[in-house]
């Protein structure tokens, strides 16, 4: 599977906003976006000019990188969102938020989505009592996500839970830190997704 192995801070600088790809570093004064708020490269400080298509493409790339999806994965998610009832853009964000790796991150078991994806792949979590190792699995209201007993001493997970106060758990999720568990209370709605995303630009891009 394709992997991005360069500095993820360059991706944040390229998109001009924090994508929270580096965990705790994104909340510190070492954040590259705060220190160098311009795109990487020798022409990064030049004033960029974007066409309508360019703005739509940049928005799609930003969301892809934020949630850690490859192009084909994103296209499948977009196609699924277009087949659902309601607004396609809001459906897209709902599908992305309901991914198991994102839910693990939102619950505070990991400091970044990339870390959460790795934890899921390594089988650290159970969903409704069964081992779940597919990051793209979509959760539904009522599902219970539990950290396996043998994984409760993993330093990365314990450290992430200790810094949970830096990241607020959305209202559609509920975390029980004492029992290393989280429950999906409801479906995510657009008002609760506070990320700087203009989903309509992505819809317009795929409507071309």
Image: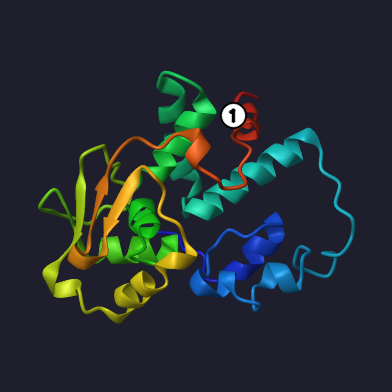
Q: Nearer the viewer, residue 165 or 180?
A: 165
Residue 159 horizontal side relative to residue 23, left or right: left
Determine whether 118 is above or below 62 in the image. below
Q: Residue at x 40, y 66 (%)?
A: 164
Using residue 185 as the reference point, say whether residue 47 is left or right of it: right
Quadrant occupied by the N terminus: bottom left
Circle 1 — which element?
helix
Q: Position of residue 60 (x, y in %)?
A: 60, 42
Q: Residue at x 58, y 69 (%)?
A: 26
Q: State the residue at coordinates (66%, 77%).
A: 29
Q: Position of residue 87 (x, y in %)?
A: 51, 22
Residue 7 seen by the camera: no
Provide the residue designation for mark 1.
Answer: 203
Furthest residue in direction right, as rendered = 47
Report the residue that reaches farthest toward the top. 85
Quadrant for the C terminus, please: top right
Disc 1 packing (10 Å; few <14; some 14–19; many ≥20): many
């Amino acid at each position: 599977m394709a992997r991005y192995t360069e500095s993820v801070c360059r991706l944040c600088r390229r998109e001009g906003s924090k994508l929270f790809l580096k965990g705790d570093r994104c909340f510190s004064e070492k954040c590259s976006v705060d220190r160098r708020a311009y795109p990487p490269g020798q022409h990064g400080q030049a004033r960029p000019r974007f066409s309508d298509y360019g703005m739509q493409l940049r928005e799609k790339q930003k969301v892809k990188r934020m949630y850690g999806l490859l192009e084909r994965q994103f296209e499948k998610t977009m196609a699924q969102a277009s087949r659902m009832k309601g607004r396609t853009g809001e459906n897209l964000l709902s599908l992305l938020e309901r991914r198991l790796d994102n839910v693990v991150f939102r619950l505070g078991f990991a400091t970044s989505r990339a870390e959460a994806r790795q934890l899921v792949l390594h089988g650290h979590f159970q969903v409704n009592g069964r081992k779940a190792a597919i990051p793209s699995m979509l959760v539904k209201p009522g599902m219970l996500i539990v950290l396996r007993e043998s994984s409760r001493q993993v330093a990365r997970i314990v450290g992430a839970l200790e810094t949970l106060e830096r990241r607020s758990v959305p209202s559609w999720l509920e975390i029980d830190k004492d029992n290393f568990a989280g429950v999906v209370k409801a479906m995510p709605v657009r008002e609760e997704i506070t990320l700087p995303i203009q989903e309509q630009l992505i819809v317009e891009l795929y409507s071309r």
